[in-house]
Image (cartoon, grey):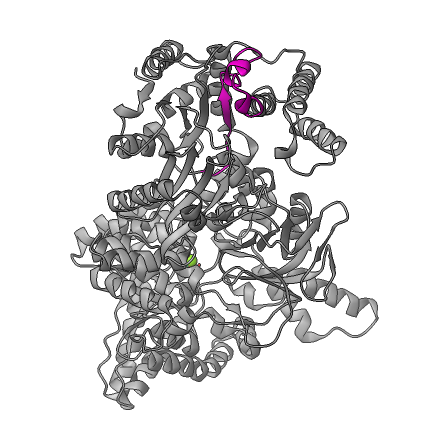
Amino acid sequence: FKYVYDFAEGDRHMADLLGGKGANLAEMARINLPVPPGFTITTEACRVFLATGEPPPELGRQVGEHLAALERAAGRRLGQVDDPLLLSVRSGARFSMPGMMDTILDIGLNDLSVLGLGKTPERERFAWDSYRRLVQMFGSTVMGVDSARFEKALAGIKKQHHVADDTRLDTSDLIRLVETYQDVILDDTGEEFPQDPAEQLRRAVLAVFTSWNGERARIYRRREHIPDDLGTAVTVQTMVFGNLGPDSGSGVAFTRDPATGRPGVYGDYLRNAQGEDVVAGIRNTVPLQRLESLDPASFARLRDCMRRLEEHYSDLCDIEFTIERGTLWMLQTRVGKRTSQAAFAIAGQLADEGLISEKEALARVDGPGLARLMFPRFDTSGTREVLARGIPASPGAAVGAVVFDSAEAVRRSDGGEKVVLVRQETTPDDLPGMIAAEAVLTSRGGKTSHAAVVARGMGKVCVCGAEDLTVDPDGRLFSTSSGSSGTVREGTVISVDGSEGLVFLGAAPLVDSPVMRYFEDGGQPPREPATQVVRDVHRLMGQADEVRRLEVRANADTPEDAARARRFGAQGIGLCRTEHMFLGDRRPLVEAMILAHDDAGREAALNALLPLQREDFIGILEAMDGLPVTIRLLDPPLHEFLPDLTELSVRVARHDAQGRPPDAHETELLAAVTRMHETNPTLGLRGVRLGLVVPGLVAMQVRAVAEAVVARKRAGGDPRAEIMVPLVDAVEELRLVRAEVARVLERVSGGSGIPLDCPVGTMIELPRAALTAGRIAEDAEFFSFGTNDLTQTTWGFSRDDVEAAFFSAYLDQGIFQTSPFETIDREGVGRLVEIAVAEGRATRPGLKIGVCGEHGGDPDSVHFFHEAGLDYVSCSPFRVPIARLEAGRAAL
Ligand code: PEP
Ligand code: MG
């Protein structure tokens, strides 16, 4: 087995094996960009290690061979005493997990080679600084020493010398610090810091493997739905140094603005610093543009590399680079994360520039990104005091109470409070707090700081580098030098505008997003002056509509929702639930129907409901004129329309206890509720079973539909009602109901003289229905998958209870990455869908098939439904644009 690949042996398509970082380094080396030489250990080696606790037996030898080749090419050996070759050891998984796993730099330094590295006087300080970084990093990440112990020692020395900045410590301070750090390690672990460079390398590699299963990495993967079994690659690369003086430095660059998508020079640069200083946001960076005056030659070379990368990848790239004494080195690149707004803008621009096709542009955006663009923003028209200004790192508007650490953020958010996490800078340890918070606000760091990168990836609002804030986590407050607001304590509500980089005191009012307004206005071509983002969205929605095969309908049961869905582009209603029409002030009528002693009583109650139902349907059919409206017969168990058993029992008992004569109505109700009580009502008397057991119910509902159609036709409309039967298990159930539907339609048609042809179909939401779909299609004119119930009954999970009961334990243990109620379970539920599609259409070629469970609006699931050959998806009105976009992407 080959576990190690030289950069020259890989390319960008090998990310599964080499991780994103390793694959892209290989690609850059391949196109002759200046990359420090190195090699990558595969994810396969990591998987072996994670499974067995041991690296593969051949790994040591293979690493040795590649190291020897590296040493030959460099003319120096790892840790050689006079002029050592030093290495960085970095993690790099298939999917980027910024800062979640370990990195160890300066491998190869020890008590002797540090002297070789620092042999000239101007390099002495640098050598000891590098050594102290290695001992610190190795001690905490490889040997497991609490990093606070190193920080305390560092702070102690800085305090002694009255300096705030590490760069002010001199060589003798650093030598002392190395000794102190080594003592800390010995004291903590009973083991010496290893002096053997090969041993350092070996242990660093295993530490990176191990960090795949570190807590931060696991939390991150769960949030990002990254599978737990991929493992990480390890990239071993020759060190280059950005901290060799003023003609050196490190930076991060984007080929376009990752916040807005605008072309230009974006990034941060830090002189005389290593890369991790830039990302950690520990010292404030300068905008990358400044490099042009600091080092014009390197700037020009960097610009050239950026242009070549963008052309090569046809996409926005982000880049990490180091300048060592005027020589530019590329340390990393990848197709960069970006805000949703930037994603739409860049896709459009690249298509305009001819770098990608219109279809490819559509592939570059996604439904979750579109959803974020539909969120509200702050109304900035009023005069509101700005508490702080910072860098707009991740857009959106968030309001919440200030908290100063991750634990407090989690605690308050678990209690239902919205919070804003305020930190000087964030580290991967803050991840749980960032997940819990509405927004992240930091006083230090640029657009590429940890806070910015992680928040952007999560779609969280973030303002970073707000330098007028002084954060005091111990005092649980921050103070601000702008405005008159002075001090803000924990718990105070603030508003964070991640699009503008502004922070306001209190809860600022929100306004709709222009993208939401665009959809509310019916998705008309934007007229000038339209905001750029609306133009970008319009263009790609048009592309999606052109290529998609799936129709998109909406789940709606009021005329208002139907009208909105239509404006959002719905091509009909896929599910009109009728149960909502039985609630509110109609409840007494439903109660009367349930309690009726005889046919006459029941009929009277049903007759009272009839005109109300008819009016409901007229409104909806009018709003959806000319488009299909699938009306589902009553589905929930009847007891849902009656008072709760316990509450009612208490009421009756209290009545008795007070010695009052019994209330006849309540007593009767209690008897009925007791009689109808079911231990497991979701599997009880509901769905089609109701129609077969409660006389007159189906007839009343169908008559209301039929008369509504007649009324709309008489008014000159084009009503297209379809009748859908829920929770069918067996074709016989459907056959009986369908016969009754036909009788009612005939009666109304005969009475009105207006022909009625309402297709009758069924939901497929029970495993038995899916498995006997071939039979069911004999009597069904269409199918609609009710994937909520189908998921519930296939997994045997109660859809109303599982989230609270055990899903988080299941997610933690990796049984699934996403709730099967959110994203369709392709393997199980999906298989039932495939069977039902195939067998249904075998019986009835061309059978129209849709889905109306929650999955109809879920981006991943939409792709599955496309592949499964469905005709349409139906989802809530607000998700209609998202489903349209994803249906288009699925068809690419
Ligand atoms: C379903 O079960 O997926 C469905 C759409 O019906 P309901 O959610 O109303 O049970
Ligand atoms: Mg259902």
What is the tally of numbered marks visible in this picture?
Answer: 0
Q: Residue at x 71, y 15 (%)?
A: 187
Residue 9 seen in the current view: yes
Q: Position of residue 883 (x, y in %)?
A: 34, 60
Q: Position of residue 788 (x, y in %)?
A: 42, 54
Task: Left or right? Give the position of 302 relative to 178.
Answer: left
Q: Residue at x 61, y 22 (%)?
A: 144
For residue 245: magenta? no
- Where residue 735 sits, quadrant-wise, is bottom left
**Which is nearer the eye, 316 or 98?**
316
Q: Residue furthest left?
A: 845
Residue 873 seen in the current view: no
Q: Residue at x 40, y 76 (%)?
A: 700
**Which is nearer the eye, 78 or 602?**
78
In this rendering, is residue 94 above or below 538?
A: above
Highlighted magenta segment, given as a residue range? 97-126
**Which is nearer the eye, 516 or 190?**
190
Q: Residue furthest bottom?
A: 715
Q: Residue at x 34, y 28 (%)?
A: 18
Q: Residue furthest front?
A: 121
Task: Left or right? Give the position of 405 relative to 657.
Answer: left
Q: Quadrant of the N terminus?
A: top left
Q: Position of residue 20 (x, y in %)?
A: 36, 34
Q: Position of residue 287 (x, y in %)?
A: 47, 50
For residue 120: magenta? yes
Q: Quadrant of ligand 2?
A: bottom left
